[in-house]
Image (cartoon, rainbow, N blue to C red):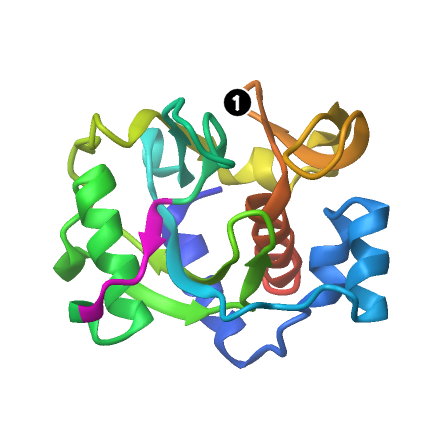
Amino acid sequence: MDFNFFEQRISKIKDLPLPGEISHYKMAPEFRIRELMEGRMVRDNPRKAAVMALFYPGNENRTQLLCILRKTYEGVHSNQVAFPGGKAEKEDGNLRITALRETYEEVGVNPKDVEIVRTISEVYIPPSNFEVQPFIGLYKKPKPFKIQESEVASLLEISLTDFLEDINLTTKKMSTSYANEIEVPAFKLNDYIIWGATAMMLSEIKDLLKQVL
């Protein structure tokens, strides 16, 4: 999809109601949905974080969405696909600043070059006790990305067209920190399986975009 057309249309999502859990539940395992609906999941003073869903023009001005593959490390989100972002620091002031700072640190995008379109619904991540605020941003005149090698293994530059295609939804048996061999709904994009909190955020973004594109 041409980025100029995308840029004109995406502004229309600013006034749309957020689908929130309706979108999130599409990409959550059944047992997690039951826990959420029955109120058994108690948030114990969650830590705050923010991420950036960054859209930009790629080859031939085609719209791309940026994700990252996190490095392998000792932690629950090791080697997972995610958006650029991370935990809030005291000096940030607000979560918008957190998202912009982390995006600069992880992929080298100057905050001055990002236009924030809007926030979407927060997602709570039980295994790490983080409450994550996602932002949608436009990077209209992209420069070469510069990854933070200590945090990021590689970049996933995802075609918007592929992202919006329902054929790229799948399920995968996964073993996680909280369950073994469970069927997990996921996106399959750029030959990577994207599941969990990032998939839930992607689902809400997709549902919003489909109303305006």
Asked if residue 47 lies left or right of residue 60, the reply is: right
Q: Nearer the viewer, residue 29 or 3?
A: 29
Asked if residue 179 lies left or right of residue 114, the reply is: right
Asked if residue 85 lies left or right of residue 126, the reply is: left
User: What residue appears at the point 49 percent right and 30 percent down from the top-left corner?
Assistant: 80
- Check disc 1 and report the residue beneath it: 190
Q: Position of residue 49 (x, y in %)?
A: 39, 60
User: Considering the numbered disc 1 on the image, is that residue within a helix, a strand or a loop?
Assistant: loop
Q: Nearer the viewer, residue 139 or 172?
A: 172
**Pointer 1 local density, CA inside 10 Å: few below 14, some 14–19, many at least 20:** some
Provide the residue span drawn in magenta.
84-90
Q: Position of residue 16 (x, y in %)?
A: 59, 77
User: What residue appears at the point 33 percent right and 56 percent down from the top-left corner?
Assistant: 87
Is 208 included in the stretch rendered in magenta? no
Q: What kind of residue is marked 1?
A: Asn
Q: Position of residue 200 (x, y in %)?
A: 63, 51
Residue 85 in sight here? yes
Residue 196 image-quadrant placement: top right
Picture layout, residue 6 above or below residue 142: below
For the image, the number of numbered tags is 1
User: What residue appears at the point 72 percent right and 64 percent down from the top-left corner?
Assistant: 41
Q: Residue furthest top?
A: 191
**On the rendered image, what quadrant is the C terminus found in?**
bottom right
Residue 136 in sight here? no
User: What residue appears at the point 49 percent right and 66 percent down from the top-left corner?
Assistant: 46
Q: Position of residue 79 (x, y in %)?
A: 46, 25
Q: Nearer the viewer, residue 37 or 192?
A: 37
Asked if residue 136 lies left or right of residue 89, the reply is: right
Picture layout, residue 128 above or below residue 173: below
